[in-house]
């Protein structure tokens, strides 16, 4: 066995491309080796700003010889078929033999492939990988044909073990592979040769290069948090920024600097956004005041003055950046939020759905309607909705779009508006994803729901629905937002009613909107179209609910069994039912009762089809001939009463407990009697009894939807 070490050394690789590039290198090289029969034990890829590295351990040194017997056309087949087989197998006519089979005699070729040295195969794989590497963006330089993310300087490729190492021969446009590399651009001691991955990693570290990006990130975070702790502060956690900065340096050196007092009164999020976006600085917060008072920067080298010159330069640039942020902040505070909102009339939301101002008015009307359903003031909900998009017209959000909503809260607070209105300005975008926090303040909930429902109904109205993996208007995210807002706040809302009523408002809007733009659309056809769309939209929300609940351990068929019940647009009730049903089916009673249900329904369907009648009549206990039959009558009677009480109370756990009591009587019934009795009266009575089993269980859920 031997090991492979490959390093592709270049100018700086953009941090955003590094992780994917390391994954692609590993996939392409190991995949090419495996396709050629070169097996190995393990592989690991690494990346720094200047190098892509792959280490493959336990590689076979030569591929085994292969012998394949390939069956061809039948003896006597047309000559063209035989010639095609010869070409595909790479053999001559005289090399063929005859194979006798029960289906006749066939030509057979024996194809022998000799083994090859792995190093030769690997050389071919490396060259092919480099030439077809899938960089998102690449460039050519000099006179060569190679495209790489940045100019490629050298290739280190060695293969072997402790006793003997050889260079894997690769020549890419005059860049010839070797066994050497170099360390840090400024602190390294020049080129050096290596004998193994361990030797390579150790010599890199001695030349101020930390190869593993995870190790670099851990060091940055460790040093940054220690530096902040030493002065009684905390680093604002930012995993994405940490990973990005780890991709900018080969030898991370953490430095902590001061933020000028001119800027300490700015909102901390503004400071953080400005430093993160432009300087890649971490914010350091004073936990006593909540203010961002210092910053962490990560240098790529050690200096004689311990980074003083680097910090001075960074602080000078930062002062200019924060001066801009302060200018935006102070100017925005001079503009009333209502005046910002008025400017939304000049911003198109969608060419078929009008301006942002028109959209805000729709959201305000809907928020006022939803408010009583969520315990909010309709007046406050409408006021918050009219202001919730205003900060989109602020200079601060224009510079830092990620602060939208948050700046709306600050501006509303500064204007002395009700706290619920200010909070709704920030929270109405939430939740943005499956792990985002869900608003729970009633006004925020009302506006957030209205915002997402307007998005869904509007794009449904103009037939801009998601298709396949394409969802340019993030409608799946909006639907998930509605689901989480309803469920995590325990809201009892009829979504179909909301969609239907809002569909009429949207239809009236569209009927007015299009003629104003020269396109005639009458109101009644638009209403009909919109109501149909509302039904379709509810189905879309149900599909997203299935995906959401699958992550919580509830299977699709269980949800389907509950969706088939009344009031399926009340998501809180629906999920309560589905959770109880899933828990019941996970028990032995649930599993066995489902089988009993299916047995009853299958018999019933078969007999109804054969007889051409529906056995929906009321069975009579006086025609029961066996004790197990009478026991089932009694169980269905008492169970039905218990079910009725539990369902009215929406206590689905109790409903499932009542169903569980039916398991033993149903099992005993099937074991003790024959449904198709000789007596026509008894047979009909028993079939009606099976129908009663079905109807009783259908009062909880449509068990026929469950695979079981």
Image (cartoon, grey):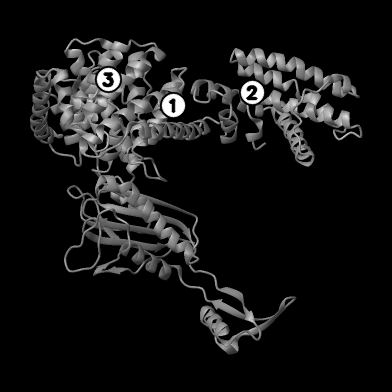
Sort mark 2 into few (<14), some (14-19) or many (20+) by Cα contacts within 10 Å.
Answer: many
Name the disc covering residue 700, or none. 2
**Mark sitting earlier along the chain (1/2):** 1
Q: Is residue 102 above or below residue 581?
A: below
Residue topped by disc 3: 385
The residue furthest bottom is 94
Name the disc covering residue 166, or none. none
**Mark sitting earlier along the chain (3/1):** 3
Element at label 3:
helix
Asked if one can make out residue 281 in the rendered structure from this viewpoint, the answer is: no
**Mark sitting earlier along the chain (2/3):** 3
Along the line of sight, which residue is nearer the eye, 303 or 546? 546
Q: Position of residue 512 (x, y in %)?
A: 26, 30
Name the disc covering residue 483, or none. 1
Left or right, 111 with reference to 606: left
Please say if the residues under marks 3 and 1 sit with CB atoms less than 8 Å apart. no
The C terminus, quarter of image:
top right
């Amino acid at each position: 066995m031997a090991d492979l070490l490959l390093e592709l050394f270049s100018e700086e690789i953009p941090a955003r491309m590094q992780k994917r590039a390391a994954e692609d290198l590993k996939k392409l090289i190991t995949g090419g080796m495996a396709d050629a029969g070169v097996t190995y034990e393990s592989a690991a890829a690494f990346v720094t700003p200047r190098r892509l590295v792959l280490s493959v351990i336990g590689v076979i040194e030569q591929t085994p010889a292969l012998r394949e017997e390939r069956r061809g056309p039948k003896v006597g087949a047309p000559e063209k078929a035989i010639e095609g087989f010869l070409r595909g197998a790479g053999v001559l006519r005289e090399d063929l033999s005859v194979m006798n089979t029960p289906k006749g005699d066939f030509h057979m070729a024996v194809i022998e492939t000799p083994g090859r040295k792995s190093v030769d195969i690997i050389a071919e794989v490396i060259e092919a990988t480099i030439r077809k590497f899938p960089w998102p963006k690449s460039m050519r330089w000099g006179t060569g044909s190679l495209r790489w993310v940045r100019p490629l300087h050298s290739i280190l490729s060695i293969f072997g073990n402790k006793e003997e190492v050889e260079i894997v021969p690769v020549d890419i446009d005059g860049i010839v592979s070797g066994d050497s590399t170099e360390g840090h651009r400024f602190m390294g001691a020049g080129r050096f040769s290596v004998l193994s991955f361990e030797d390579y990693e150790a010599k890199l570290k001695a030349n101020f290069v930390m190869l593993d990006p995870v190790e670099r990130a851990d060091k940055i975070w460790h040093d940054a948090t220690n530096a902040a702790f030493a002065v009684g502060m905390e680093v604002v956690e930012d995993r994405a920024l940490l990973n990005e900065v780890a991709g900018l340096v080969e030898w991370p050196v953490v430095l902590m600097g001061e933020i000028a007092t001119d800027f300490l009164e700015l909102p901390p999020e503004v400071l953080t956004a400005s430093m993160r976006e432009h300087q890649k600085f971490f914010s350091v917060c004073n936990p006593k005041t909540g203010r961002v008072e210092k910053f962490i920067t990560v240098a790529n080298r050690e200096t004689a003055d311990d980074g003083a010159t680097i910090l001075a330069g960074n602080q000078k640039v930062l002062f200019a950046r924060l001066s801009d942020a302060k200018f935006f902040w102070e100017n925005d505070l001079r503009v009333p939020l209502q005046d910002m909102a008025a400017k939304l009339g000049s911003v198109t939301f969608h060419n078929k759905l009008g301006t942002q101002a028109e959209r805000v008015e729709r959201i305000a009307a809907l928020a006022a309607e939803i408010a009583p359903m969520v315990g909010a003031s309709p007046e406050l909900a409408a006021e918050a909705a009219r202001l919730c998009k205003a900060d989109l017209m602020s200079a601060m959000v224009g510079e830092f779009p990620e602060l939208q909503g948050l700046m709306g809260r600050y501006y509303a607070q500064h204007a002395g508006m009700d706290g619920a209105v200010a909070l709704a300005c920030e929270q109405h975008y939430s939740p943005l994803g499956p792990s985002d926090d869900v608003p729970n303040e009633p006004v925020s909930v009302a506006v957030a729901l209205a915002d997402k429902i307007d998005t869904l109904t509007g794009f449904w109205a103009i037939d801009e629905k998601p298709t396949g993996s394409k969802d340019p208007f993030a409608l799946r995210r909006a639907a998930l937002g509605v689901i989480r807002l309803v469920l995590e706040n325990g809201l009892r809302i009829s979504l179909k009613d909301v969609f239907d009523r809002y569909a009429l408002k949207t239809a009236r809007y569209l009927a007015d909107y299009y003629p104003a733009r020269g396109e005639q659309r009458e109101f009644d056809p638009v209403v009909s179209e919109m109501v149909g769309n509302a039904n379709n939209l509810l189905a879309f929300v149900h599909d997203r609910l299935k995906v959401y609940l699958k992550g919580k351990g509830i299977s699709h068929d269980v949800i389907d069994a509950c969706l088939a019940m009344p009031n399926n647009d009340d998501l809180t009730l629906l999920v309560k039912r589905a959770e109880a049903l899933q828990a019941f089916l996970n028990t032995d009673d649930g599993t066995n009762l489902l089988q009993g249900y299916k047995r009853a329904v299958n018999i019933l369907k078969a007999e109804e089809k054969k007889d051409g009648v529906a056995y929906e009549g009321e069975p009579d206990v006086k025609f029961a001939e066996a004790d197990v039959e009478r026991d089932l009558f009694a169980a269905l009677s008492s169970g039905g009463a218990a079910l009725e009480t539990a369902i009215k109370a929406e206590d689905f756990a109790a409903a499932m407990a009542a169903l569980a009591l039916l398991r033993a009587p149903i099992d005993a019934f099937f074991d003790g009697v024959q449904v198709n009795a000789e007596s026509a009266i008894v047979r009909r009575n028993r079939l009606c009894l099976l129908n009663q089993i079905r109807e009783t269980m259908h009062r909880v859920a449509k068990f026929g939807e469950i695979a079981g």
